[in-house]
C-alpha cells in the first residue's frame, strides 16, 4: 500500500523537504510560485530579485503591500513568506551558480530575454532540467527543457523587440507607435542621457528626400529667426532657452515640420504634415482621466506643464544631472503622452489616450493574476514529475483564452526533440553571418554580434587561419588595440571561420563569415538562418575526439535515471507577465511548422501547438495530476 504524506507519496514528500530551491525573480508568477512551493512541502528556498516594488506590481504580486513601495523585493520577501507560513528558511542572493541547487525557478520579466538565454545556457552546461513558462494576458505556457532530450529555449527563434528605421521616426511617421518612440527619444534628448541613435530632428540623410540644401536653407528660416536658434544639440539648445515650453513647442512642432516640408519628394505619395502653432482653440473631452483623448490644445497645455515639472526636477538634481524615463513617473509619462499626440495630430493620425500611450511606450502586456496562478501551479506539477524520475511524461502545456472544440482550456503536447540547427544546443553549434569585412570593426563583432545577437557574456575569438590568431580576448586590455580595426585587417575574408568561446557559459560557437557589400542601409550584419546548411544532424552518441560540445561532453545524452531515483537537478524558469511579447505563449505563432505528436494518442499534427484557439483544437488532453 502506498504511504502518503498529504497528497504526495512519502518518498516524494521526503525528497521535497530536503530539496534546495532557487527562485530567480519574485514578480507576478514568482509570488504565486513561492506560495506553491511552500504549500507543496519545500523547506529550503533561495530567492534572487534585484528589482524594487512598484505600485503597478501590487495588483498581482500579493506578497507586497503599498507601504513597501520602492523597497527591494529581495529584502522583504523573506519576512513576508516567513510570517505567512513559518516553515522554511529563505536566503537572498545577488548572484548564484545553478549547479548548487536542485531546483532553480526563474520568474523574471519577459523583457530580459538575454538573461533568460543565459540561464538556458547555464542549464545546458550543468545538464540541469529547466521548466520554462510565460504568460500574456489570458494566455500561458509551460514547457520542460532537458539537454539532449528536448528543445532548448533558443532552439526556436524568439521575436526581438520591434525597431524602426531612424528616418521613419524622424521624418515620415505613419503609425502612432512611431510618434511614441519619437517622444521617448525626445525625453532623453532633452532631460536624459543623449544618444546619437535617438536624434529627433529631421533626418537630412533620408534616401527618399530629394531637396536642394541651398533652397532648404532659404526656405526653412523660421528656426533661425525665432530666438536665433542654431541647429545644435537638442539638449544644448533647450538649456540655452531655459527649457522654455513655448520655444520648445515651436521648434519641435512648427519649425522642424516646416523644415521637413522642404524635402518635397517625401510628400509626393504621402500626406504632408501640418505645422502647428502654439495658439489653438480648446476642445472638450470626456471619460476617465487616463482614458481621455484630449484635444490638441489639451495636449499643448499638458506638454507645457510636464516640461515645467521636468525642468524643476533637473534643477533640483543640480548641474549636469539627468532624468531617466519611467512609465510610472507621472511627469515623464505626461511628457511622452503630450509630445506623441501632438505629433500624431501633425501627421494626420488619430490621437491616443494616456492609457494607450503608456501601454505602447512601456511595452505592457495586460497582467492577469489568475493566469499567473494557473501557470505557477503547472510549473510545480511538472517539477514533481521530474523529481519522480518521470521526465519522459513531462509535457508542454498551453493555457488558452477560450476552450477548443473538445472544451479544453489546458492543452498538453509532446515535447519537441532538440533542433539540429540550433546554434546553442547542437552538437557543433555553427552559424553563418553575412557582413562587410571592410567596414565591420572588431568592436562591432564583439558587442553587436557576439554579445547582443548571440548572447555571449565574455567571448574569446580565434581565427581559424592555421596560426591560432587571437582576435578578441576576454582578458581586460589584452586585445584592446584590435577594437577599432576592420576584420579585413586580420585577413578575414569571404569563407573565413571564427571560433568564439565563452567560458562563463561553457559555450562555443563557430562563425562562418560571408562577405557582402549589399547590406541594406543601417544594417551592419545578417544571420543566414539559424545555422549553415552543412551543420551536422544531431548525433545519437557523443563523438570522440575534440568535438565542440557545449557543456560536459559526458552529459550530452538524455538522463537515463529510472523511476524512483532522485538524482536529477531541476531548473524551473517562468516569466513575469510584464514586457514585450517574448514569452513562448506569444512566440509560438512565429515558430516554424513541424510535425508534433499528441500527448495521448501519439498521432502527429502538421502544425506546432500554439496558445491560441486554432492550435488548441488540434490537441485534446487535460493535465494528468500526480497521485
Image (cartoon, rainbow, N blue to C red):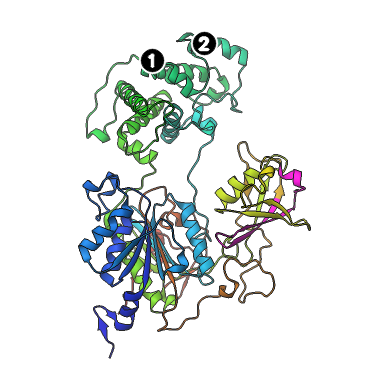
Q: Nearer the viewer, mark 1 or mark 2?
A: 2
Check if mark 1's residue and mark 2's residue have beta carbons within 8 Å: no
Q: In which quarter of the image is residue 554?
A: bottom right
Q: In which quarter of the image is the N terminus?
A: bottom left
Question: Which of the 4 image quarters holds residue 178?
Answer: top left
| Circle 2 crowding by C-alpha within 10 Å: few under 14, some 14–19, many from 20 | some
Which residue: 63% across, 43% down?
A: 444
Percent of width and height locating residue 556: 57, 73
Q: In which quarter of the image is residue 240?
A: top left
**Residue drawn at 45 percent across, 55 percent down:** 587
Residue 234: where, in percent of width, then height? Answer: 48, 23
Q: How far apart are marks 1 and 2 (CA)?
A: 16 Å
Mark seen at residue 596: none
**Is the residue marked by circle 1 packed among few (<14), some (14-19), or many (20+) residues within 10 Å?**
some
Whether residue 274 can be seen here: no
Residue 490 is a magenta residue: yes
- Side of 315 relative to 263 (left or right): left
Q: Mark 2 points at which residue?
A: 221
Left or right relative to 118: residue 45: left
Q: Relative to residue 257, is residue 124 depicted above or below?
A: below
Point out residue 406 in the picture as x, y percentages from the top left corner. Answer: 33, 67
Q: What's drawn in magenta, residue-wise?
A: 486-513
Relative to 596, residue 193 above or below = above
Q: Is mark 1 on a helix, strand or loop?
A: loop
Badge 1 or badge 2: first in the primary sequence:
2
Give the image location of residue 386, x and y in percent: 40, 75
* Residue 169 magenta-highlighted: no
Apparent side of residue 376 relative to residue 423 in the rendered image (left or right) = left
Under circle 2, the secondary element is loop
For the residue pair 613 and 388, the one nearer the viewer reads as 388
Q: Is residue 281 in view?
A: yes
Label placed on residue 277:
1
Amino acid at each position: 500500500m502506498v504511504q502518503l504524506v498529504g497528497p504526495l507519496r512519502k518518498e516524494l514528500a521526503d525528497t521535497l523537504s530536503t530539496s534546495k530551491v532557487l527562485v530567480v525573480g519574485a514578480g507576478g508568477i514568482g509570488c504565486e510560485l513561492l506560495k506553491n512551493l511552500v504549500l507543496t512541502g519545500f523547506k529550503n528556498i533561495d530567492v534572487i530579485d534585484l528589482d524594487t516594488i512598484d505600485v503597478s506590481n501590487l495588483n498581482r504580486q500579493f506578497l507586497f503591500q503599498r507601504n513597501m513601495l520602492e523597497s527591494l523585493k529581495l529584502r522583504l520577501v523573506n519576512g513576508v513568506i516567513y510570517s505567512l507560513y513559518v516553515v522554511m528558511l529563505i536566503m537572498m542572493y545577488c548572484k548564484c551558480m545553478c549547479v548548487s541547487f536542485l531546483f532553480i525557478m526563474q520568474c523574471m520579466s519577459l523583457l530580459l530575454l538575454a538573461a533568460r538565454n543565459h540561464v538556458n545556457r547555464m542549464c545546458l552546461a550543468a545538464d540541469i532540467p529547466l521548466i520554462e513558462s510565460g504568460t500574456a494576458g489570458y494566455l500561458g505556457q509551460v514547457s520542460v527543457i532537458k539537454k539532449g532530450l528536448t528543445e532548448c529555449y533558443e532552439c526556436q527563434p524568439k521575436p526581438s523587440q520591434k525597431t524602426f528605421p531612424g528616418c521613419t521616426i524622424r521624418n515620415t511617421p505613419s503609425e502612432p507607435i512611431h510618434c511614441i518612440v519619437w517622444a521617448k527619444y525626445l525625453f532623453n534628448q532633452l532631460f536624459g542621457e543623449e544618444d546619437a541613435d535617438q536624434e529627433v530632428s529631421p533626418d537630412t540623410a533620408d534616401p527618399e528626400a530629394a531637396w536642394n540644401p541651398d533652397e532648404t536653407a532659404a526656405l526653412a528660416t523660421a528656426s533661425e529667426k525665432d530666438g536665433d536658434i542654431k541647429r545644435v544639440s537638442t539638449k544644448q539648445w533647450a538649456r540655452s532657452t531655459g527649457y522654455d515650453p513655448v520655444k520648445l513647442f515651436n521648434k519641435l512642432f512648427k519649425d522642424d515640420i516646416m523644415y521637413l516640408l522642404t524635402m518635397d519628394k517625401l510628400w509626393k505619395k504621402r500626406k504632408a504634415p501640418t505645422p502647428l502653432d502654439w495658439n489653438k482653440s480648446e476642445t472638450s473631452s470626456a471619460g476617465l482621466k487616463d482614458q481621455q483623448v484630449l484635444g490638441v490644445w489639451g495636449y499643448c497645455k499638458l506638454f507645457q506643464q510636464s516640461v515645467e515639472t521636468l525642468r524643476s526636477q533637473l534643477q533640483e538634481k543640480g548641474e549636469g544631472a539627468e532624468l531617466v524615463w519611467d512609465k510610472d513617473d507621472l511627469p515623464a509619462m505626461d511628457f511622452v503622452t503630450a509630445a506623441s499626440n501632438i505629433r500624431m495630430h501633425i501627421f494626420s493620425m488619430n490621437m491616443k489616450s494616456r492609457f494607450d500611450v503608456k501601454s505602447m511606450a512601456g511595452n505592457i502586456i495586460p497582467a492577469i493574476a489568475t493566469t499567473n496562478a494557473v501557470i505557477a501551479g503547472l510549473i510545480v506539477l511538472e517539477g514533481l514529475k521530474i523529481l519522480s524520475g518521470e521526465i519522459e511524461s513531462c509535457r508542454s502545456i498551453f493555457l488558452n483564452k477560450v476552450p477548443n472544440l473538445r472544451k479544453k482550456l489546458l492543452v498538453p503536447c509532446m515535447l519537441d526533440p532538440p533542433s539540429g540547427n540550433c546554434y546553442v544546443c547542437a552538437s557543433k553549434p555553427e552559424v553563418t553571418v553575412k557582413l562587410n569585412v571592410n567596414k565591420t570593426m572588431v568592436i562591432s563583432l564583439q558587442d553587436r554580434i557576439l554579445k547582443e545577437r548571440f548572447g555571449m557574456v565574455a567571448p574569446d575569438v580565434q581565427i581559424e587561419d592555421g596560426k591560432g590568431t587571437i582576435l578578441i580576448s576576454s582578458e581586460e586590455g589584452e586585445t584592446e588595440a584590435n577594437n577599432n580595426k576592420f576584420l579585413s585587417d586580420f585577413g578575414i575574408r569571404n569563407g573565413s571561420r571564427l571560433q568564439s568561446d565563452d567560458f562563463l557559459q561553457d559555450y562555443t560557437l563557430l562563425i562562418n563569415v560571408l562577405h557582402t557589400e549589399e547590406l541594406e542601409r543601417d544594417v551592419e550584419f545578417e544571420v543566414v538562418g539559424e545555422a549553415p546548411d552543412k551543420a551536422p544532424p544531431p548525433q545519437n552518441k557523443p563523438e570522440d575526439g575534440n568535438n565542440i560540445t557545449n557543456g560536459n561532453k559526458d552529459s550530452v545524452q538524455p538522463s537515463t535515471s529510472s523511476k524512483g531515483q532522485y538524482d536529477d537537478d531541476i531548473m524551473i524558469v517562468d516569466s513575469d507577465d510584464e514586457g514585450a511579447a517574448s514569452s513562448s505563449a506569444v512566440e509560438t505563432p512565429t515558430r516554424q511548422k513541424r510535425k508534433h505528436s499528441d500527448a495521448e494518442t501519439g498521432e502527429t499534427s502538421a502544425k506546432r501547438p500554439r496558445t491560441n484557439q486554432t492550435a488548441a483544437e488540434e490537441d485534446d488532453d487535460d493535465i494528468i495530476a500526480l497521485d
